[in-house]
Amino acid sequence: GDGYYAGGLIGWSAEGIISNSYSTGDIDGYYYTGGFIGGSDLMEISDSYSTGNVTVVSGYNGGFIGYDYSSVITRSCATGDLTASSND
């Protein structure tokens, strides 16, 4: 859906471990939007991927993670397109 902290797998996550996971759906968001996770803090993420396209209006956004603070990410990627749209 449209909004803050939108992610293909998780909207927001902190101080956890994710491994061998994936997301495939397209994501539309406004702020803190990512194909896999919208926002993360102090996570350990490994061997994971997202394939969906990400369409955003503004803010911190990315193909894999929209916003991150000090997470460790290994052997993970995003293959979808990231598109910024106008909110007009």
Image (cartoon, helix red, strand yellow):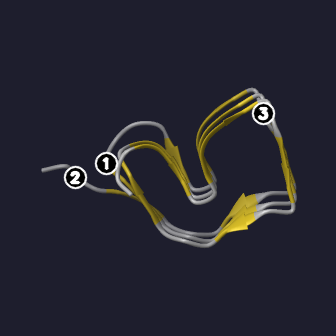
Residue type at tag 2 = Ser
The percent position of residue 53, horizontal first and vertical second, equals 50, 68
Q: In this picture, is 43 found above or below 82? A: above
Task: Please tell me which residue is depicted at 34% across the width and 41% down the height of the picture.
Answer: 58
Label 3 sits on what residue type?
Ser
- Give the residue at mark 3: 71
Specify few, some or many for label 1: CA neighbours under 10 Å numbering under 14, 14-19, or 20 or more: some
Q: Does residue 59 appear left or right of residue 86 in this picture?
A: right
Q: Residue furthest left?
A: 88
Residue 4 picture location, percent across and down: 41, 40
Question: Could you tell which of marks 2 and 1 lies nearer the N-terminus?
Answer: 1
Q: Position of residue 76 (x, y in %)?
A: 80, 57
Q: Earlier in the sequence, mark 3 or mark 2?
A: 3
Question: Circle 1 sits on which residue?
Answer: 57
Q: Label 2: which residue?
A: 86
Q: Residue visible at 57% across and 58% down?
A: 35
C-alpha span from label 2 to label 1: 6 Å
Element assignment for label 2 = loop
Tags 2 and 1 in contact by the CB under 8 Å rule?
yes
